[in-house]
Image: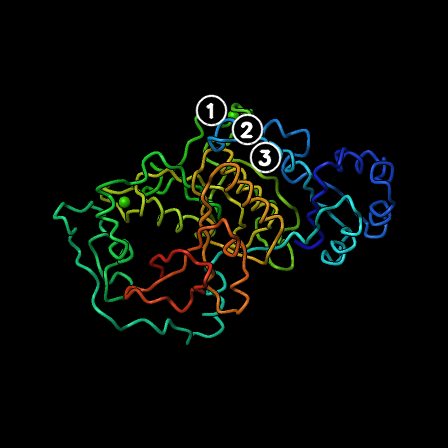
Amino acid sequence: MPGEVVVRFRSDFPECAHCLFSEGRGFSATTGTRVLDQLALRYGIRRIDPLFGGLHETDRHRRALERFGGSAAGEADLSAVQELGQTYVVKTAPGVEPGVLAQELRRDPNILWAEPNYIYQTAGNARGLARLEDPGVEDETLGSGPPLTTLEARNGNALPDDPFLASSGSWGQDFPDLWGLYQIEAPEAWEHAQGEGVVVAVVDTGLDVEHPDIAANVWQNPGEVAGNGIDDDGNGFADDVNGWDFTRCSRLTFSGCLDAETKEPGPEVTDRQGHGTHVAGTIAAVGGNGVGIIGVAPKASVMPVKALSDTGLGVTGEMAQGIIYAAENGARVINASWDGPPSETMREAVEYVTRTFDAVVVAAAGNNHAPLARTRYPAALPDVLTVGATTETDAVASFSKLRRASRSCGPGRE
Ligand SMILES: [Ca+2]
Ligand SMILES: [Ca+2]
Ligand SMILES: [Ca+2]
């Protein structure tokens, strides 16, 4: 995000940095150097805001850890909670190059790291852009190989009555519409489990929560009362009955927000872009309701966490907030069908939820053709389950950057 840098102070930094700044007390008495005060003047630093609630909100994180943390939560987890309070977003005067300021901030020994508040994008965006630029881009592996598996469940049991599970060719293709489900033998797996009791967070562009094929599977926050303006369950978010919208810009581009005014985060998670709803349906569309499609886990709950704007682009800091919200409110699986440049903010959020909450972060391996794809986050992070895409003939789809780090492949073509 232009004009924004994310800064992580050392764990033992004794003061709340945004308090020092907003109260005009200056940093030098605490840091022992004048670096930060000089930079604040030179780069016109306007605000310093805690990214995850600051030191005074660590109780909130601690309560979440008690409720949803790994069974062996210990000292290391408590210190991870404490460290969340040391991450801040620094907002500068217009025209300041975030990379330059980040480099300067790292001169202060109290700062562990500093980086631009990077912009991430939905996994489909780059491919879509490539297609726009070159309509000839095709998946070279298509159109050959054996026909797909039969439409009948192999054990002879009846299939759910969702119409797209039985249809073929709806988009002009010569194979079943939901071929991917047959390819991974989902009908056989449904005999054993359908995702009952599992909360899957979809950190994305939001969700059409009233869509008839997802509504029954949308996560409900059991302790929250809608629309009373009160944070009834004390998780730090008022009226978050279905999830939370962390975005501060409705129409984000790589050069900034198109809107004149930024918006406030809030409980309304409506998807105006479509990507999040598409992903949520693939994961947990309601099965056996005679409507539409069926998800891979048709009885899982989907927690919509909106952290990407209506353009499919999102800001790293807000996406990190979304990942942490998901784990702290009970999501065991966190879906990340998006990517961006390597980021300490992203790394810390993913490490926090995977190590402290035992959550599984599932990331797209990256669908773009750029050589940089192998270093994209969160896919390249060690604790992440990275999923590449295959075609209906089990070949690796050309749009998916399958790498050594990929540990899984799932059917994926449009
Ligand atoms: Ca709440
Ligand atoms: Ca409420
Ligand atoms: Ca359905």
Between the C-alphas of marks 2 and 3, the distance is 22 Å
Q: Which mark is residue 76?
A: 3
Name the residue at 75% across, 46% down: 111
Mark 1 is on which residue type? Gly
Q: Is residue 384 left or right of residue 344?
A: left
- Seen from the viewer's position, the closer of residues 304 and 310 is 304
Residue position marked by numbered label 2 in the rendering? 235
- Seen from the viewer's position, the closer of residues 166 and 338 is 338
Mark 2 is on which residue type? Asn
Label 2: which secondary element:
loop
Q: Are marks 1 and 2 in contact (CB under 8 Å)?
A: yes
Label 1: which secondary element:
loop
Query: How many numbered dots are placed on residues in this image?
Result: 3
**Image: 157 above or below 25:** below
* Image coords of residue 40 (percent x, y): 82, 47
Ligand 1 lies under 8 Å from the Cβ of mark 1: yes
Nearest to viewer (mark 2 / mark 3): 3
Between the C-alphas of marks 1 and 3, the distance is 28 Å
Residue position marked by numbered label 1 in the rendering? 223
Ligand 1 lies under 8 Å from the Cβ of mark 2: yes
Nearest to viewer (mark 1 / mark 3): 3
